[in-house]
Image (cartoon, helix red, strand yellow):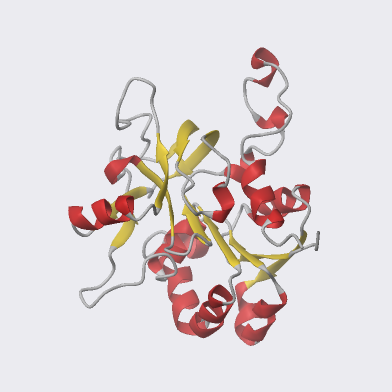
Amino acid sequence: MATPKVLVLRGPGSNCDQEAHFAFEMAGAFVERMHINRLREDPAQLQRFQILCVPGGFTYGDDVAAGKILATQLANFLGDALRKFRDAEKLILGICNGFQAILKAGLILPPDEDGPLATLGHNDSGKFEDRWIHLRVNPNKCVFLKGLESMHIPVAHGEGKFITRKQWILDGLKQAGQVVLTYSHPNQPEAQYPANPNGSMGAVAGLCDATGRVLGLMPHPERHVLPTQHPQWTRLGLAQEGDGLPLFRNAVEYFAT
């Protein structure tokens, strides 16, 4: 198997880039972290990599809206390079703030003549939500989620509510198999707060693009790659690995030769 190269793209306020680096290394990839200013200086560098990861954090302080400034940079300064990267059948992963950025940059859902189809807004609770949650996985053709049915990983965000401009847009995304991750509760057909920590429409926690090669999700798989990262591992027993690791391994194995 060839060893894919992963670019973890950080910016001012990124704080999960080292965890994402570690997760991809555990999955068997070669990983490089790079500041967005360095990539803006030479966008052609992006083509050296097979996987792009935009990690979590609070880029630029989320001063305008969560991930919005980073999204503007991605769209306006790196748009051509990112489209070339995506069209070469490479992979893009956005986690938490990274999901906010790639969604608002149009990398998952290109806008139509009326503007963006969806966004991520403030949590219904009006506060930062930080807890472990359960996810139902509907992989469809999403490369990152192949073979997965559920995940138990943490969330940590203040603006994670998935909202579509119209209900029919969400219905269409479901029918197209692009709603690949939803918050789940064993006794609720559609998870409600606190199982759905932000009030997302349709309990959406993650979304892929039409190709299945671009994934954005609000929860943090990189924070549960080791079994000992689970807060109850001493009570539940030591699992073979954390629930988040297969997501990163799937990305690496996609480039197996």
- Asked whether the viewer can see residue 163, the reply is yes
Q: Quadrant of the N terminus?
A: bottom right
Tell me if residue 116 comes above or below residue 251 in the rendering. Answer: below
Left or right: 123 in relation to 91: left
Q: Position of residue 235 (x, y in %)?
A: 65, 13
Q: Position of residue 18 (x, y in %)?
A: 70, 53
Question: Observer-nearest residue: 166 or 39?
Answer: 166
Q: Residue placed farthest to the front in the image?
A: 257
What count of labels does the image hold? 0
- Asked whether the viewer can see residue 67, the reply is no
Give the quarter of the image for residue 4.
bottom right
Q: Quadrant of the C terminus?
A: bottom right
Q: Position of residue 74 (x, y in %)?
A: 49, 75
Left or right: 228 in relation to 70: right
Q: Position of residue 149 (x, y in %)?
A: 51, 35
- At a point 39% along the width and 54% down the height, the residue shown is 178
- At a point 67% along the width and 79% down the height, the residue shown is 47
Left or right: 110 in relation to 74: left
- At a point 38% along the width and 48% down the height, the residue shown is 160
